[in-house]
Structures are given as C-alpha cells and as structure tokens.
Image (cartoon, rainbow, N blue to C red):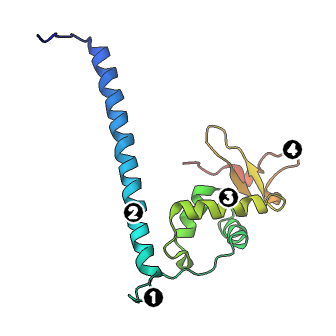
Amino acid sequence: MTKTVNFSEQQLAEITARYERRLAAITKEAEDIRAVLTRLKGEERSSSFSTGERGVRRGRIQWEKFILDKLQDKNELLFKYEMRDLAFEDDRIGDRSAIQVDRALSAALYKLKDRIQSYNVPGKKGYAYGLPEWFEKDGSVKEEFADKEWD
C-alpha cells in the first residue's frame, strides 16, 4: 500500500532547491576528484624517467617582487584574485594550479605585510592591497585610488 503525500508549492520548491544544491555540491566534488586524479596520473608520467615525458616546465617566480611590480604597473589596488589572474598571464606560471598560485600569493602577501597595505572594500569579501603611499594616515585610501570600480 502506497501513501500519497501532497506538498504545498513552497514546500516543493524548498525540497527541490535542497536537492539541486546537493547535486551541485556532489558534481563539484566529482569534478575536483577527477582533476586530482588527472594531475596525479600526469605527475606519475612526468616523474618517470623511462618514458621521457615531462610536465610543462615552470619558471621561478619571486612572488613578493611579482606583487610589488604588478601593483606599481597597474597603479591601483588589487585583490588577490586579480593578482592570480595576472599571474596566469605570466609565461613562468607553467602548469601551476589556481590553488598553488593562491597559496604562493598568500605567503608572499604575508611576507610583504610591512611593505604593502590592505584595504577592506565595503561590500566586498577579502582585502584589496596597495602600496603604503596610496593610503592616508588613518588607513583610508587616497582619492585617486578610491575611485576604482570594484567587480
């Protein structure tokens, strides 16, 4: 004997949304697992001397210098994700993943804490970084740097 349950439209919408969120999370996790497996299989080949295959060669990036140079070149406050995007335009990046670049940038930003300044942009998650001369003594951004349109 089957029992029929009737849901209101709101209940049905909530249940559907919950399952769609779960499906999206599971799909994302499956994609992440596939990416890790692909990288692992690729690293096994690149570390094997018998096959002669190698991964894309990476150049040495001095991340602190990279950050300072990009801030000066752009002459505007930059979020870490903007720095990451600029890093992927650099030929020396090689086959690094976004996670590896983020970690390197985070470490470099920490090391630069006395040479750069962070700014919490209202309504945005994270910090924008700039050179100390771009800030007032009270920590606010000088007028010429405050007019950036934040994505």
In this rendering, the answer to whether 67 lies above or below 50 is above
Residue 93 visible in the shown view: yes
Cα–Cα gap, marks 1 and 4? 57 Å
Point out the frontmost of discs 4 and 3: 3
Q: Determine the residue positioned at 44% across, 83% down.
A: 48
Q: Picture quarter containing residue 53?
A: bottom left
Callout 3: SS: helix
Is 32 displayed left or right of 151 in the figure?
Answer: left
Which is more toward the observer, 9 or 56? 56
Q: Amino acid at mark 3?
A: Ser
Callout 4: SS: loop
Point out the frontmost of discs 2 and 4: 2
Point out the frontmost of discs 3 and 1: 1
Q: Residues within 10 Å of mark 4 (few under 14, many from 20)?
A: few
Cα–Cα gap, marks 2 and 1? 20 Å
From the top left corner, tell me how far across and down residue 122 is, in percent: 66, 38
Callout 2: SS: helix
Going from N to C along the chain, the mark reached first, 1 or 4, is 1
Is 35 displayed left or right of 120 in the figure?
Answer: left
Residue to which mark 3 is pinned: 106
Q: Which mark is residue 49?
A: 1
Point out the frontmost of discs 2 and 1: 1
Cα–Cα gap, marks 4 and 3? 25 Å
Going from N to C along the chain, the mark reached first, 3 or 1, is 1
Q: Residues within 10 Å of mark 1 (few under 14, many from 20)?
A: few
Going from N to C along the chain, the mark reached first, 2 or 3, is 2
Going from N to C along the chain, the mark reached first, 2 or 1, is 2
From the top left corner, tell me how far across and down residue 12 is, in percent: 27, 18
Cα–Cα gap, marks 2 and 4? 49 Å
Q: Which mark is residue 26?
A: none
Residue to which mark 2 is pinned: 37
